[in-house]
Each structure stands twice: as structure tokens, then as C-alpha cells.
Image: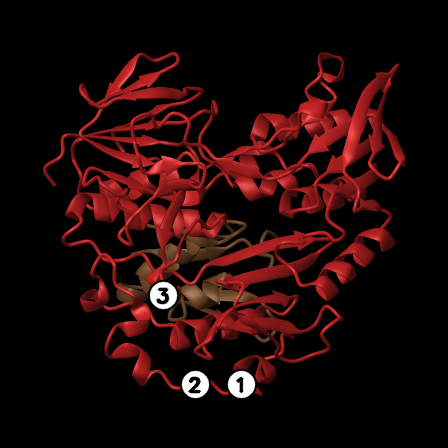
Chain colours: A red, B brown
Amino acid sequence: VSAQRIAIVGGGVAGFRAAERLRELGFSGALTVIGAEPGAAYRRPALSDEVLAGTSAARISLRGRLPVRTRWLGATRVVDIDWERRALVTDRRGDVLFDQLIVATGLRPRRLALFEQPELAGRVHVPTTLGAALRLREAVRRRGRVLVVGAGLVGTEVAAALARQGATVVLSDAATRPLAGLLDADLGDALAELHRRRGVQLRLGAAPVAAARRGRIVRVEFADGTVAEVGDVVVAVGAEPAVDWLGGLPAAGPGGVRCEPTLHVVGRDDVVACGDVAAWPNLRFGGATARVEQWTNASRMARHAAEALLVGPGAASPYAPVPWGWTEQWGMRIHLVGARRPADTPHVDDGAPTAFSGARTWTDLLGRTVGGVVIERPWATLALARRIETECPAPNAASLSRSADPHEAPGRHQRTGRFRRTKTAANQHQPA
Amino acid sequence: VSSVHVEHRRCRRHGLCLLVAPDAVRVSRSGRVEPVARPSGVALDQVREAARQCPVQALEVRE
């Protein structure tokens, strides 16, 4: 532990957990966390759900305390890096010097030019920060009619939460189904039907093409000629890695910050990245470099990154999790486990495929279970995650050469027997 | 000595703690998450990690 100064850029769960882990591991130098939001880290996924339903800001705090002797610079943005002086240039706190750096800036939500007109100010919401979510909650309480543009995870959760609060909600997406990138067509259709039954008006297959203020109303026109007249608009059309501040770092680009399997940023021994901004090869699943936009992953990954930074690239182990994500809508829990690539083959494990009861899993070309979606069956989720852990084992240290293809790594894969396919542990453990 | 607490009103029964902390958490007959009373060693490490990852932060480890 020789570094004197470590700076963590990003005040979300990844930045917080990285700081926590550095002190746990005995790092005794100066530690600074720089976050764009004014307050402490919190459960961001609660913004599109519990917070809109009335949960107080205090109830979405994280377990654990900020470690001792940590400088937390809130409401502060890093605008550039001076690599010569090893200084982070901030917008309002001057320069922060560092010897080692943890990149944990997460995502920046996309915005739509259509909704950026001055006349719509105060009526358009991008609720990915606590402040913005609280403003949306108040606006919808006041005006009661809302259009949610984008039926991804955030959009569908926001629509459900606001409709549940009694608001009139229109949910639109250019795709023809909600969660189009995550769910197969039949499950997407079933989710759409659930929202419809609960009173959400769906405008699917239609992108907004015009928006204007008409007195107290915001009038939005869609490509199919339909119109929505609402009080407020939520823009939830995805997000991009927040990398614009990483000047002079060749590994940073539109796809995020590229990392080695250990989470060291490509080309740097003194910089690691974690959370939604970081793209890395997960050797458990064949090692394609990719990002994972999941809150639970950010927490785990931050701890791994902190450790990797302290021990250095030679001694660090590869970060090879089985990703685990969730969404809850209308009280229904959807779990997304593992990884999925286009070449993987879908299987319906048990239960009827179109009802919200089955586990949908995917196997890769080697016949290994690599991922799945489970709806309202926590025991099936558990069994699926364990099956993936067994069939796609974490790489051993020997297989960690920087360009290693885990399919060719000796030893572990051959020892892995195929899990019984027809009946999983889930069948024997139905929840009470 | 560390003790583990579950805020049952907050728990949504996602079951992630059962995956992360198999030696420290089990489910009662009524479907409630029940931590072992005073975990130590591996079980304690597991349950600390489960508390960090819990989607609704319903688990708390008091050190």
C-alpha cells in the first residue's frame, strides 16, 4: 500500500463501495471522492419506484458508513485531467491531486432535443438523480397527467409507480414492446398487457415527433399521428457512459472505459474503473468486453476494483461475476441473471412460456447455461444463478493471461458436468 | 460480536441474500428471511456482502 493519494470520481454506489473497501484493506493515504450530486450515495434504483411512491430520501440510504478520513466533495464535477501534474480539474473545488484513480462516474441519461425547448422548462423530467425524482413526484401530484417516453427499465418502473399513485400515465416507445432489449417477444407482450390492465395507456411503435406548450398543457405528437396531452413529460430513453471528463485517456470512449479482466484501465497500472461506466471482459462468459448496467454489480465491482488498484495488475484477480439484476413493476419481480449473447439459444425451463411463471434461460454454443430471466420465482432465480456458476466457472488464476480465451483454458471446463436440464432445484422449492 | 437484522417490512424477497450468503441466511417456513444469530468467519463475510448487495438494503449487520 504505497500510494499516497487515491481519488475516486463518482459519488454513486460504486464510488462509495470503493472508498469503503480501500479503508477495509488498510489504505491509509489521502482519499477523496468526487460526486456530481450534493448528498451522500443512495439506492439509485429506488428513484423510479419507491421515491415516486412517496418514500423519503432518508429511506434510500446505503448500508454502511463513509469510511474515516474520507473527503467527500459533493455537487462537484471533474471537467478534465491534467496527467502531467496528476490533477483532476473540478468545476468548483479547484484541483484534486492523485497518485491513483478510480473511475466510477456511471451513466449520463440521454436527452431528446424535442423536449429541450425553453417553453417546456419545468415540465420535462429526467428522473435519474434524487433531486429530479423529487421534482417529478411533486409535479405529477400537482398536474396528474404524465407522458413517459421510453419503455425500458426506468420508463416502465416510472410509469407503474406514477399510475399506482393515481396519475394518468401514457407510456410510449419506438419499439413495439416494453423492455424490448431484455425480454423475449412473448414476455414483453405479457408485460405490456399487465401495464394496460392496470390503466397505463401504451403508445408502442411510435416515437414522439413534435412537442409544444398549449397553455397549461404539453401537447406531444407521435409518428403515427396520435397525440398525448399531459402536464408533464418523463424522458427515459437510456443513458451513456459518463466519460467526457476523461481527456487524454485512450481507453475511454462512447462504449465506456475499457478495462483488463482485473478492472485496470487498458494501458494504465494506476487507474481502475467500476460500475456502469466500465467495460471489461468477463472471463466467465468468454471474455467479450462489455458493460453491465446493474446496481448490484456496481457494488461488487467497486470492491474488486479497489482491491485490484492496491495490489496492482500482476497480483490482481479477474473480475468474473454472474450478473444479477432486477426490476419490480406492479409488485411483480423480474430477475435478470447472467449474460446473454445473440448466438445463445433460448430454453423455456418450466412453466408456461407466456404466463409470468416460467424461467427463460439461454445456453451458449457449448451447451452451458449462461443466463436467464425469471419472473416472480425467487427460488428459480437462485437455482439458475447457481447453475450458471457451476456450468460457467470463474476463471482460475492460470487462465488469466491478458488475451486468454477461457474456452481454451485447460482444466476447469472439462470437469464441469452438465446440470440436469429437465428439472431444476427450483421445482422442488416452491415459495410458500 | 456482530449481529444481523432483517427489516421485514422492507424485504421484497428477491432472494439475493440466499445466493450471496448461503451459510448465514435461510428462509423460515412462513417465507421470511432469517439470518443466523451470531455469524462469524466465512458466514459473517457472506452476510456483510449480502447487506451491501441487497436491492432494498433490508439487511443490516451491526458490528
Q: Quadrant of the N terminus of chain A?
A: top left
Residue drawn at x 46%, y 62% as measured from the top left: B17
User: Which of the 4 quarters of the picture holds residue A320?
Assistant: bottom left
**Looking at numbered disc 3 in the image, what kind of residue is underneath it?**
Arg
Chain for disc number 1: A
The kind of residue on which mark 1 rests is Arg
Q: Quadrant of the C terminus of chain A?
A: bottom right
What residue sits right under mark 2 in the picture? A418
- State whether residue A74 is above or below residue A351: above
Q: Secondary structure at mark 1?
A: loop
Q: Residues within 10 Å of mark 2 (few under 14, many from 20)?
A: few
* Alpha carbons under labels 3 and 1: distance apart: 20 Å
Gap in Å between the C-alphas at discs 3 and 2?
A: 16 Å
Q: State yes or no: discs 3 and 2 in contact (Cβ < 8 Å).
A: no
Q: Position of residue B13 (x, y in %)?
A: 58, 62
Does A79 sit left or right of A86 as displayed?
Answer: right
Q: Is residue A400 above or below residue A94?
A: below
Dot 3 and dot 1 within a common chain: yes
Q: Image check: B48 left or right of A325? A: left
Give the answer, above or below, for where A385 lies relative to A101. below
Residue at mark 2: chain: A
- Mark 1 in CB contact with mark 2 (< 8 angstroms): yes
Q: Disc 3 or 2, which lies upstream in sequence?
A: 3
SS state under label 3: helix
Q: Earlier in the sequence, mark 3 or mark 1?
A: 3
Element under disc 2: loop
Amino acid at circle 2: Arg
Identify residue for label 1: A421
Asked if residue A65 can be seen in this view, the reply is no
Between A332 and A101, the residue placed more toward the observer is A101
- Residue A313 x %, y %: 18, 49
Q: Which mark is residue A284?
A: 3
